[in-house]
Image (spheres, helix red, strand yellow):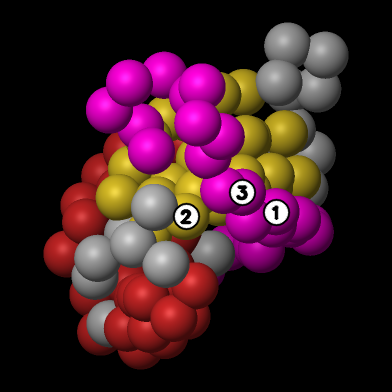
Amino acid sequence: MLYELRTYYTHPGRMPNLLARFRDHTTKLFEKNGIGNVGYWVAENDPNCLIYIVRHPDGAAMKANWDKFRNDPAWVKAKGASEADAPIVERLTSVTMNPTDFTMPGTN
């Protein structure tokens, strides 16, 4: 299993829009397109920072999953609607991670 730690930095005041998009659309579309949801957090010291972890079977699947997701008509529609008045995400970072042999049971 390959895990991906992603951090989204929103434009000021746009976090509610990002959270709504994830809650109402993104997490379901991730699952539909092979991206496993692990967890989502808002940084305590930065209210414009969403941190989340997703999982993929391996690196090749990760690339294929993201390609499917980005091209999913439901995602294109949801993203467009949520950004009709202004962009939400200012920037993002992504780190891929391999679990260690002492990672919590069931996560590796």
Instruction: Name the residue: 44% across, 81% down.
Output: 60
Q: Quadrant of residue 45?
A: top right
Above or below residue 73? Residue 2 is above
The residue beneath circle 1 is 95
Mark 1 surroundings within 10 Å by alpha-carbon count, few (fewer than 14), some (14 through 19), many (20 or more): few
In magenta, the rendered stretch is 84-108
Query: Are the residues flagged by discs 3 and 2 in contact, CB closer than 8 Å?
Result: yes
| Mark 3–mark 1 distance (CA, rounded to whole Å) | 6 Å
Query: Is 94 part of what is drawn in magenta?
Result: yes
Query: Are the residues flagged by discs 3 and 1 in contact, CB closer than 8 Å?
Result: yes
Query: Is 40 part of what is drawn in magenta?
Result: no
Q: Quadrant of residue 106?
A: top left
| Mark 3, secondary structure of its residue | strand
| Mark 1–mark 2 distance (CA, rounded to whole Å) | 10 Å
Which label was assigned to residue 2?
2
Q: Is 78 situated left or right of 60 in this image?
A: left
